[in-house]
Amino acid sequence: MQTNEIDVRVREILRLALKTDVPEEGSYAREDDPNWDSLKHVEMIFMLEDEFDVQFAEDDFAKMGSVAAIVALVEANHAA
Amino acid sequence: MAVQMSTIVDQAFARAEFQKVVFAQAPRRADLLRAAKKVPTKAPPIRLRVHRNHPFEFIASLLPAMCAYDGRSIDVEIGEYDDSLSLALQGRADVELIWLDYERYKLTPDALSEWLKCRVEALRGASPAPILVADWPRRMGGAQGFNESLRAWGKDVPGVRILPLDEAADALGDEYLDKRMASVGATRLSERANVTLARLMGLCWLPAVLRPRLKAVVFDLDNTLWGGVLGEDGQDGVIVDQGYDALQDKAVELAQSGLFLGILSRNEPEDVEAMFASERMTLPSQSVSARTISWGSKSEGMAEIAKTLRVGFDAILFVDDNPGELAAVASTCPGIQLLHATPDPLETCRALEFYPGLFTFGGDATDALRFADLATNDARQSLRAQAESHKDYLASLDLELRVAVNPAANRARLHQLSQKTNQFNLSLQRLSETDIADVLSASDRHVVAIWLADKFSESGLIAAMFVSADGQGMLHVDELCVSCRALGRGVEDIMMVTAIDAAAAAVIVNGGARIEQVRFQSEKGPRNYPARAWLEAFSGQTLGADGSVTVAWTETPRTAQARALPVRIKTGEPNANQ
């Protein structure tokens, strides 16, 4: 799967999970969005795991604080 | 009409699409949230108030999608984490939910159950809404005894239902928990568990406490209960594989849980009869209470089935593989529920597991009575045809009426009568179990229950009259509900006369005045014309603008005629809970 495609799908998941207007491109991080609390973070992880058919390690949960970081983790999980 | 039909067709197709997501083997959160956006919901929303000591949010966020499939929206009010269950209540809720992680408590299972009972009773006193209590989703150690204890006292507190999380946990096995989430989300539930529990909550548990259960499931046959077309493929050519076996088993299970089964199919009746007689069918013919097998329209066939079963369209779920047929039936049978049978019978099977309005929290003794009544209707009709008069007909039935005032052990059935009756429900008050418990314990209000039996069957508790006295000789009939099973035998008058006599006696026993007048209150609803028409005929008056009518409680030709009918009258509750 191409990085661009992962990026588009991650942003769509974030829109659904955070119920917020995540931009189609550019950086987007947890500190940009007051809706992105720990509960929404868990829902986002649930949806990302379903969407990309991956299982993130517990240590990765805290690293998933931006679109770029999530895309990198999805790619790493797919590569593994 | 064309616009209306196209709207119905659009809705039928939209629901069929949503169905794929909601009833998937493992629904996905993102798919549910996407699909729910496309479905309109009815106001007002269900108000669910959650008393908890661990996260409910991951389930709550899925409930709007689940409820949307049921055409409802939902507002979930989640309280603070509170092990003590202090029950801070503000405003009204439609449903109260107690959502506790019992692993957090240091009490013994017995002591924990006792403590919880006290808190639930306190909540019962503070809120009239149904109370759902999650059980301990574990079957090992003390949890099993705790759950048994919960279910035992849960029956005694009005309006309490115990949620079988232990069954969901059993079904998911190791997938029920996801320990990775404890550090980041303070939850140990896996996503599979969240989605499973949200589906049960939104489609099964909430509908079960918020509205009457559906009464019948009507199946198409070709490409629904079996694969292929009987008329073209023949008895040996249609497919009844493991999937269709499972679906037919599911139909049997629904019948055993108290629902009527119907068959509505375009086929040759002889072919269908032969198919049911063959060893290929898991669903036995005798499990089907009504059938229309013909080449006529399915709308007409459905009307025949509803008439045979004596149920309204809104109490029927129709299952068919053809969305066009579903839409056509929906356009002429207002309120009917629709389920699209997909090419995968296991998917249809799963949909029937979760379809809103099919789930029930417990077996209902009246279900068996309903089947017996229906099964013996033909015999009654035959007697009626032979009898020379109505009086002869009743005499041949060997009818017995039994009345009891404030029969507390029958609270659940009285609640059912108030909630489920439509045609003979005079004021449509739809009393909650808590309302009924209040009446049962009051001295100035009473409920008179009526049981009916004839030589063919025990109909059980079939009518309830809720009354209050004003202390000056006036008896107010606040609500009157009669099961449709009891109608059609021409005993409405004697039932009411007997009930009013019993109520009047109860008023005097409680220190009230002798009843000289009876005031009936009625409310016009979409389907209670039979009750209001009976009241006008019985009182000999036209109902007032407020729906009420007052009669002097003296013997009239009509009451005398009723008392002269050959019906045995007995008093007191029957020994068995009928």
Image (cartoon, rainbow, N blue to C red):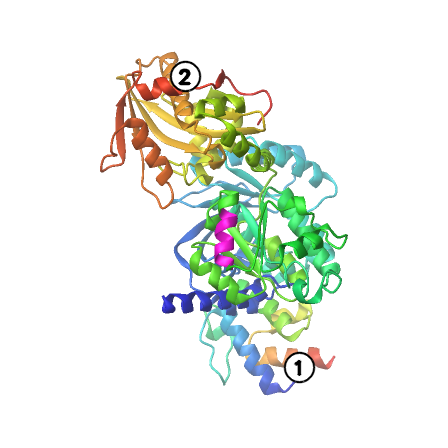
Q: Is residue B398 visible?
A: yes
Q: Position of residue B428 (x, y in %)?
A: 37, 39
Q: Which mark is residue B564?
A: 2
Q: Which mark is residue B183?
A: none
Q: Alpha-carbon distance for marks 2 and 1?
A: 86 Å
**Dot 2, crowdedness within 10 Å: few (<14), some or many (≥20)?**
few
Q: Position of residue B536 (x, y in %)?
A: 29, 32
Subunit that carries the residue with mark 1: A
Is B206 in front, or is A36? B206
Is B483 in front, or is A39? B483
User: Residue B76 lies in magenta, yes or no?
Assistant: no
Q: Quadrant of residue B113?
A: top right
Q: Which residues are magenta?
A: B298-306
Where is mark 1, residue-wise? Answer: A75
**Image vertical order of residue B536 relative to residue B514, above or below:** below
Inspect the image, locate mark 1, and give the three-letter code of the amino acid beneath it.
Glu
The chief SS type of the magenta part is: helix
SS at circle 2: loop
| Residue found 48% across the figure and 83% down from its top | A24
Inspect the image, locate mark 2, and give the three-letter code of the amino acid beneath it.
Ala
Relative side of B556 to B17, left or right: left
Where the C terminus of chain B falls, by quadrant?
top right
Subunit that carries the residue with mark 2: B
Relative side of B100 to B36, left or right: right
| Residue found 56% across the figure and 77% down from its top | A10
User: Residue B304 lies in magenta, yes or no?
Assistant: yes
**Dot 1, crowdedness within 10 Å: few (<14), some or many (≥20)?**
some
| Residue found 75% across the figure and 52% down from its top | B278
Where the N terminus of chain B falls, by quadrant?
bottom left
| Residue found 55% across the figure and 35% down from its top | B377
SS at circle 1: helix
**Image vertical order of residue B346 relative to residue B558, above or below:** below
